[in-house]
Amino acid sequence: MTDKFDFKKEFKELYMPKTKPMIIDVPEIIFIMIDGKGNPNTCKEYKNAMEVLYGLSYSIKMSKMSGTQPDGYFEYVVPPLEGLWWTNGERFDGIHIKNKDEFCWTSMIRQPNFVTVEVFETAKKVLTKKKPNLDLSLARLEVFNEGKCAQIMHIGSFDDEPSTIKVLEEFIVEAGYQNDISEKRKHHEIYLSDPRKVSSEKLKTVIRHPIV
């Protein structure tokens, strides 16, 4: 049996950094994205976003089962969930978190390069038939060009991220760069662990900040 293409293994520099910070040039990547606002632990908007993102991603992945796979299709593992985070009215650095209800976010899952607008729209139709009550209106397909960034692996609870981010920020300055978080470039997290299956102290999260 042919091994499935695993983006995490094939692009280790993007998904498997060490707990020591590093600089990386992130290439253009295709994502399905959904924007929203609110505490991810409690708001319905975030729950809906998760259902839509995974529903669309798996609809595309499983298209082979119905013989409707797109041109260029290959066997692959659905990439991990990612998130861009910010708050309105102030620069969000991931350290000074006051009220999670004020979070603004873009949740997203990477897609293989064979996923075109046509493939995306077909997946939406398939998912709508399966789950007609699911709101797909906010989902979009976008090519994301993140550029030069600094990143680090955080191991532990999401609430303990500030200490790791401080290490990352110190590294950015020492390396001769400056943090470039702005309205266009955001605090970025990649979730490598499933919180439902992994204890909080063992969660692995890539934390990535844009730099200039």
Image (spheres, rainbow, N blue to C red):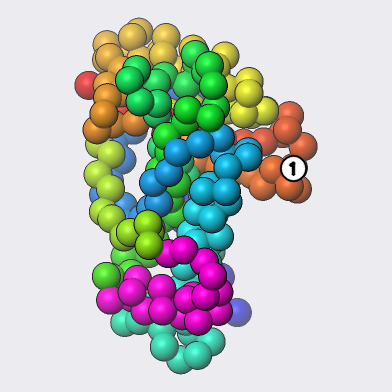
The answer, for residue 32, to whether it is visible in the render is: yes
Name the residue at 50% across, 40% down: 190
Q: Position of residue 114 (x, y in %)?
A: 32, 71
Q: Quadrant of the C terminus?
A: top left
Would you say residue 183 sits in the magenta stretch? Answer: no
Secondary structure mostly seen in the magenta stretch? helix
Q: Position of residue 90 (x, y in %)?
A: 34, 17
At mark 1, the secondary structure is loop
Closer to the camera in the image, 138 or 161: 138
Closer to the camera in the image, 156 or 83: 83
Give above or below for 74 relative to 27.
Answer: below
Give above or below for 121 relative to 188.
Answer: below
Q: How many marks?
A: 1
Q: Quadrant of the N terminus?
A: bottom right
Name the residue at 52% across, 75% down: 132
Residue 150 located left or right of residue 157: left
Name the residue at 46% across, 80% down: 126
Q: Which residue is mark 1?
A: 198
The stretch in magenta equals 118-136
Residue 17 located left or right of residue 212: right
Q: Position of residue 101 (x, y in %)?
A: 53, 30
